[in-house]
Image (cartoon, rainbow, N blue to C red):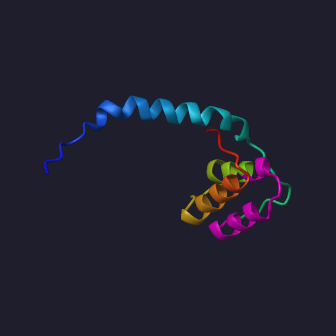
Amino acid sequence: MFLSRVNATRFQPLVVSRLFSAAVPLLKYCTDKPPIKSWPERLFPKRLVSMITQQQNIDLALQIFMYAGKSHPGFTHNYDTYHSILFKLSRARAFDP
């Protein structure tokens, strides 16, 4: 069977527009202040996973996730942090169809 190559540049504008439209509602979660008062000085992925999973408020869990990735120096998300926030949001059915 012959499979042709798909031109990736043809689909790029569609992907970018979908990503942007999906990110617009999340802009309210970007803040300069830590979402919780007891924010750790040094943040590790394991600690962030713990903070997200212990949080009962879904919006606050997402704020914690977003703040850690954007405003905490030297921190980068990994598989565990992405998994924890996606699991939390999916259990709350917090995705639009």
Which of 38/19 is in front? 19
Query: Residue drawn 83% across and 57% down?
Result: 56
Residue 8: in magenta span = no
Residue 58 in picture, x, y percent from top left: 77, 51
Query: Residue drawn 65% across and 59% down?
Result: 87
Which of 13/97 is in front? 97
- Image quadrant holding the C terminus, namely top right
Query: Residue drawn 20% across and 42% down?
Result: 5
Residue 68 in picture, x, y percent from top left: 67, 54
The residue segment tinted magenta is: 43-61
Eyeballing the image, is 38 above or below 11? below
Decide if residue 50 is in sight here: yes
Decide if residue 34 is in sight here: no
Residue 78 in picture, x, y percent from top left: 55, 62
Eyeballing the image, is 73 above or below 42? above
* Residue at the bottom extreme of this rendering: 46
Which of 93/67 is in front? 93
